[in-house]
């Protein structure tokens, strides 16, 4: 018997949530025994590498809050065995749509919610991700999955869930099969001068201030540079901090880029100074192109899980710019960089789309009783 799985996503090709869902769909197809639909509420195109076996269904709306009628229609017509939603506000929509779709004599599949971050941080960063509503409603889903053990434990405790109904499904990362083009920034073409790279949405909990302070300490002793890739509310403050410390010649924020892996692939190391990370997908993305990683031990436990407590990348205490600077200096040693580059590739192989898909199907069949 084949399991029919529907993955509700905002976009099949953009932003972290869409990338995770599409990579998971890839893994489910590779593992076999599963038919996969991506159910999208945006018009973004599917990634070119998505297998033809994955069907993309458009809900014809521009935001998740307007998608309940279309999602109900999809569930009643396609009747997947499992609907999987991710992002807290999308989980609420999935709960509502699944309830309506079941009556009368309607959809009989199972609903699985994905909780990517400790619930208190989801609530703090987006008013729609209400932690109290999650506490009241998550118990009505058949199951919940999380990408790291810390987030799993957090949602079990907060919502009072049965531990058997909550699974661990890491965010998948495929091996890099792309093409490295010309260096996307002049600094990355200079093999003699180390360049650190950071990529994020520049929210305040990404702690760009900590990164700039740590780099300033490194720069006092070493000839190095730092590129900060991405766009977000903290970019102006980061630029101000760079100017105050007189680092304009050696630190640059480069804004949004279509392919940040082109930066990581040529960097001396990738640095993540966050206060909170439920998984830290940017670490596995950097690892996939052989870039060694340095991270704070952020709340949410993502970097701790990805690096396996510092085995696959350098892990330092959260909020400690001096420890972060020392880790960056340690990565300037070629033998250390080579070691963690190889270890990162090994870790990515352990977090492949097929491995994550297997974790998901095991959870569905063994813990939720979905026939396979």
Image (spheres, grey):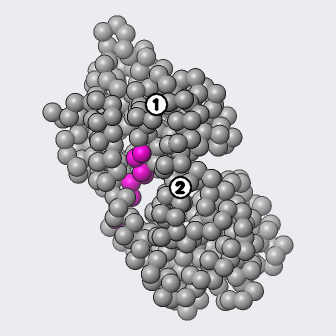
Judging depth in this view, the residue of 321 and 92 nearest the camera is 321
Q: Is residue 98 left or right of residue 25?
A: right
- Most extreme residue toward the right is 244
| Circle on res. 47 | none
Q: Is residue 161 left or right of residue 362?
A: right
Corner quadrant of residue 77: top left
Is there any visible trace of residue 199 in the rendered image? yes
Q: Residue at x 54, y 76 (%)?
A: 269
Corner quadrant of residue 216: bottom right
Q: Residue at x 56, y 54 (%)?
A: 301
Judging by the rendered image, the residue that carries numbered circle 1 is 162
Q: Which residues are magenta?
A: 168-175
The correct choice, above or below, for 281 with respect to 336 in the image is above
Judging by the rendered image, the residue that carries numbered circle 2 is 302
> Magenta span: helix, strand or loop, mainly?
loop
**For residue 172: magenta?**
yes
SS class, disc 2: helix
Mark before the other along the chain sequence, 1 or 2: 1
Q: Residue at x 42, y 51 (%)?
A: 170
Q: Position of residue 317 (x, y in %)?
A: 66, 65
């Amino acid at each position: 018997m084949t399991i029919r799985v529907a993955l509700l996503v905002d976009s099949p090709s953009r932003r972290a949530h869409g990338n995770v869902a599409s990579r998971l769909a890839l893994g489910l197809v590779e593992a076999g025994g599963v038919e996969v639909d991506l159910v999208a509420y945006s018009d973004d195109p599917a990634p070119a590498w998505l297998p033809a076996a994955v069907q993309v269904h458009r809900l014809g709306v521009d935001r998740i809050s307007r998608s309940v009628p279309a999602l109900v229609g999809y569930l009643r017509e396609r009747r997947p065995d499992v609907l999987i939603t991710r992002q807290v506000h999308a989980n609420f929509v999935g709960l509502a749509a699944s309830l309506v779709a079941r009556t009368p004599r309607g959809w009989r599949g199972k609903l699985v919610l994905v909780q990517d971050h400790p619930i208190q941080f989801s609530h703090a960063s987006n008013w729609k991700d209400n932690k109290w509503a999650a506490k009241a409603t998550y118990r009505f889903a058949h199951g919940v999955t999380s990408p790291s053990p810390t987030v799993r434990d957090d949602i079990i405790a907060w919502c009072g869930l049965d531990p058997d109904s909550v699974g661990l499904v890491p965010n998948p990362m495929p091996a890099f099969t792309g093409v490295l083009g010309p260096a996307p920034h002049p600094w990355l073409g200079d093999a003699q001068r180390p360049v650190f790279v950071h990529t994020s949405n520049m929210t305040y909990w990404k702690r760009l201030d900590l990164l700039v302070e740590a780099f300033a300490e490194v720069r006092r002793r070493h000839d190095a540079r730092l590129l900060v890739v991405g766009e977000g509310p903290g970019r102006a403050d980061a630029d101000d901090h760079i100017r105050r410390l007189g680092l304009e010649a050696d630190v640059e924020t480069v804004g949004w880029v279509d392919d940040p892996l082109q930066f990581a692939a040529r960097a001396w190391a990738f640095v993540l100074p966050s206060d909170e990370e439920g998984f830290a997908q940017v670490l596995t993305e950097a690892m996939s192109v052989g870039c060694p990683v340095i991270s704070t031990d952020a709340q949410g436990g993502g970097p701790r899980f990805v690096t396996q407590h510092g085995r696959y990348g350098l892990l330092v205490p959260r909020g400690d710019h001096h420890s972060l600077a020392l880790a960056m200096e340690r990565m300037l040693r070629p033998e250390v960089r080579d070691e963690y580059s190889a270890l990162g590739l090994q870790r990515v192989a352990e977090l492949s789309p097929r491995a994550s898909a297997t974790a998901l199907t095991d959870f569905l069949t063994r813990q939720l009783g979905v026939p396979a």
